[in-house]
Amino acid sequence: MNNKNYIALTGIFFGFVALGHLIRLILQLEILIDSWPVPMWISWAGFIGPAFFSMWALKLARN
């Protein structure tokens, strides 16, 4: 596997992570860890960060 393929695969992975958080935000899904409800702001951070890294990696893979 060369670097370009690795960077593209990383971008796709981060895209799926961002998509999962976006789906949680849209559907307002509640997640419990043990008995602790995970706040929605964590999914905002979990969407913005990986979405940025996904776009960055896919842009690098394209060039």
Image (spheres, rainbow, N blue to C red):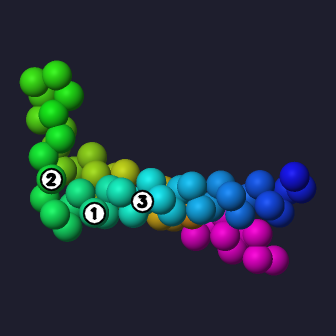
Query: What is the spatial separation of the Cα atoms under label 1 and label 2, in whole angstroms?
Result: 8 Å
State if disc 2 and disc 1 touch (CB < 8 Å): yes
Query: What is the spatial separation of the Cα atoms under label 1 and label 3, in whole angstroms?
Result: 9 Å
Question: Quick one: label 1 or label 2, which is nearer the N terminus?
Answer: 1
Question: Quick one: label 3 or label 2, which is nearer the N terminus?
Answer: 3
- Is residue 10 located in the magenta-colored stretch of the structure? no
State if disc 2 and disc 3 touch (CB < 8 Å): no
- Is residue 58 located in the magenta-colored stretch of the structure? yes
Q: Which residues are magenta?
A: 55-63
The three-letter amino acid code for the residue at tag 2 is: Leu
Identify residue for label 1: 23
Identify residue for label 2: 29
Question: Quick one: label 1 or label 3, which is nearer the N terminus?
Answer: 3
Is residue 23 in view? Answer: yes
Element carrying mark 1? helix
Q: Is residue 44 left or right of residue 1?
A: left
* Residue under the image location 16 percent in, 63 percent down: 27
